[in-house]
Amino acid sequence: MAAPMNAPARIPNPTTDWQQQQRAARLSTGELLAGLGLSAADFPHGVIAAPDFPLSVPPHFRSLIRAGDPHDPLLLQVLARGEEALPQPGRLTDPLEEADYREAPGLLRKYRSRALLIASGACAIHCRYCFRRHYDYGEAMLTRSREAEALAAIAADPGIEEVILSGGDPLSLPDERLAALVMSLEGIAHLTTLRLHSRTLTTIPDRVTPALLALLSATRMQVVIVVHTNHANEISDAVAAALGRLRQAGVTLLNQSVLLAGVNAAAPVLAAHARRLFAAGVLPYYVHLTDPVAGAAHFDVDEARARAIEAELRGVLPGYLVPRFVREVPGRDSKTPLSAL
């Protein structure tokens, strides 16, 4: 018998070892549905049993999904639904044309004062709308053998003030590897800010280890972490506690979301999310319109609807809690506000 519609899935989390939880994230479509009391028949276009972009859903995140509810906003972000296989004209495998910005192995230069390192090809959770779901990490990822070339390129340009660690997810790296990379960056005198983009923090809150806190509090660089959540239900008490430990370590916390049909494309949902973020010490930063990545067209929200949602949010939230609605347009020197599209 399926669990009540308002009940979360009862998925045990028997370990605080974050790397073990990361390994436990891989599962099949059938295993995910069975754990939630659902079947393929609960979805209009069915599901994909063995998707090319495999499922990866950490136990903590799974525990927050309402069992028996095929419309749960967390489930819809991670389940390979049949819509992914429908014809999607105009969709791309590299929607942001990132290959054009590769300056050295693992190094992307899109903006003048910032450099981005693809620090890892791994991510604890596979979001079905991910713009890098088709990314060739083997070709583009930073590796120890190629790290010197990327660091030399950063050191050679004094206009670079901030380095962004991205991926995949940089916090999929062990603490020791991450510490070695941060130490190398600290040796570049003109760097003032270290930014990490991470989904792991809010899907495996045990990733906030004492070693990670010590590393981030000790660096001379100002540390900013941009977490990625899309719905208030993702910010559990355990996640809020982990974020609180980061704040105590002096880390500035921001959030970026993606506007997703069926998940958060309504002003009341985004307003509740913003308030929950603020209660956890995180400021809303961006709401991205979806990128035209192949396999994710069913998440798209048209620009007119997005503008209406943004306008409604401005009427119900204080200005500091209203995220900027943007789209990333290849070739432009910054994110493009929705109002400028």
Image (cartoon, grey):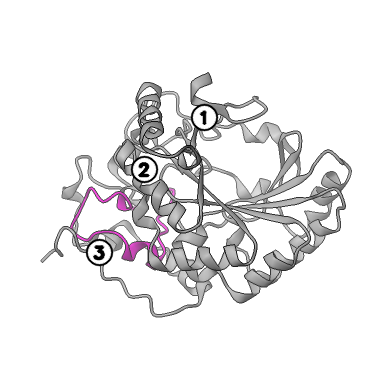
Q: Which residue is mark 2?
A: 271
Q: Main secondary structure of the magenta part?
A: loop
Q: Earlier in the sequence, mark 2 or mark 1?
A: 2
Q: Nearer the viewer, residue 142 or 214?
A: 214
Q: Nearer the viewer, residue 120 or 337?
A: 337
Q: CA distance from mark 1 to mark 3?
A: 33 Å
Along the horizontal axis of the image, is 276 left or right of 245?
left
For residue 4, which quarter of the picture?
Answer: bottom left
Q: Which residue is mark 3?
A: 8
Residue 273's place in the image compared with 205, above or below, is above
Q: Residue furthest bottom?
A: 14
Q: Which residues are magenta?
A: 49-75
Can residue 175 be seen here? yes
Q: Residues within 10 Å of mark 3 (few under 14, many from 20)?
A: some
Q: Nearer the viewer, mark 3 or mark 2?
A: 2
Magenta run includes residue 27: no
Query: Residue at coordinates 65% horizontally, 74% vertically from top-left?
Result: 211
Q: Say which amino acid is labelled 1.
A: Arg
Q: Which residue is mark 1?
A: 327
Residue 45 in the image: state x and y as whole percent. 22, 40
Q: Residues within 10 Å of mark 2 (few under 14, many from 20)?
A: many
Residue 205's place in the image compared with 185, above or below, is below
Q: Say which amino acid is labelled 2.
A: Ala
Residue 184 in the image: state x and y as whole percent. 81, 60
